[in-house]
Amino acid sequence: MANSSSIPHFLLLPLPGTRQLQLLHFCLFLAIYLAALLGNGLIISTIASDHHLHTPMYFFLLNLSILDLGAISTTVPKSMSNSLRSTRDISYAGCAAQVFLFFFFLSAESFLLTIMSYNRYVAICRPLHYETLLGGRVCVHLAAAAWASGVLYALLHTANTFSLPLCQGNAVDQFFCEIPQILKLSCSTSYLRELWLLVVSACLGFVCFVFIVVSYVQIFRAVLRIPSQQGRHKAFATCLPHLAVLFLFVTTGIFAHLKPSSISSPSLDLVVSVLYSVVPPAVNPLIYSLRNQELKAALSKLLPGCFQKQ
């Protein structure tokens, strides 16, 4: 039985064989990556530079953009590099780093989206207590807790995964290193430890999801009681972007990991993995900025002539 430390490198999912398709893959990933860098970078710069946006909602949105940038930068650059060099290799240390960073950004984003739903609940359902429940120090502590929880979970899963003996080869059936794919390379029953950890993590994620659903049930009940149509529209406008981001994050992740094996194919698996790991960080800035008049106004100040106030 070979120890995992004896594996010098891993082989990622082979991309389409012809050189033209490999270059097409590179160009597609480059376009998505640049869109993510531009969109999230603009949101971070705008919120940081405009004091009108120094509120809890935009503070959490800034953190979300940083996490999105980190998540997409963990997987896409290496995949683009492999496409240009017509290779599948990733070093053992590079694979471990990808697992740690991707799991860190993913779990921290899950906690942050839960915190953002609590922020919306307090703002709409308990507005008189908003400053007390979500003051500046509380927001910093909540964001720090999301980041720290992500680090803890990533350390736990990465250390446990790479302590397993791997003797089923070194080919990872994914375009980046991912824990479920690495577990398939283990031939020891000790991989059940990591499976249990993943189950516990999934249960915690389900608890977060239930918390978000309950929060939004209360939010919609409160919004529907607002007498003015303009007030209801404004309340819905602040909630819908968060719901859209949450829907994209949850549905793509669930489909990627729980889709029936009967419909699996290399091409479909690649498309699904791109949808859940690459597309959300690029699309989130667009979702948040489309209907947010305050963010549009701040962007128009940051980039005169590029945006118009509405």
Image (cartoon, rainbow, N blue to C red):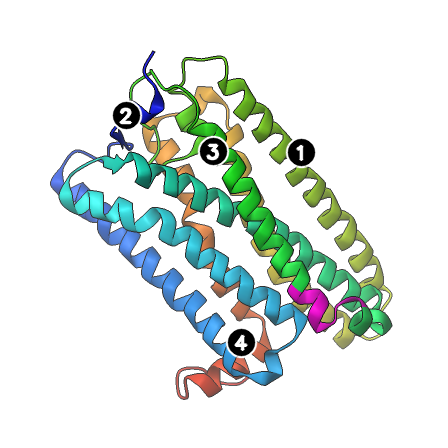
State the residue position of label 4: 47
- The type of residue carrying mark 3 is Ala
- Look at the numbered disc 1 and give the secondary structure of its residue: helix
Q: Main secondary structure of the magenta part?
A: helix
- Which of disc 2 and disc 1 is earlier in sequence? 2
Among the 4 quarters of the image, the one containing residue 203: top right
Q: Which numbered disc, 3 or 1, marks the residue closer to the eye?
A: 3
- Which of disc 1 and disc 3 is earlier in sequence? 3
Q: Which numbered disc, 4 or 2, marks the residue closer to the eye?
A: 2
Range covered by the magenta-colored residues: 133-140
- Tell me the distance, in whole angstroms, between the alpha carbons under discs 4 and 3: 36 Å
State the residue position of label 1: 203
Are there few (<14), some (14-19), or many (20+) residues within 10 Å of tag 3? some
Contact, mark 3 vs mark 2 (Cβ under 8 Å): no
Residue 134 left/right relative to 188 = right
If the image is split into quadrants, where does the C terminus sit?
A: bottom right
- The type of residue carrying mark 2 is Ile
- The type of residue carrying mark 4 is Ile
- Tell me the distance, in whole angstroms, between the alpha carbons under discs 4 and 1: 34 Å
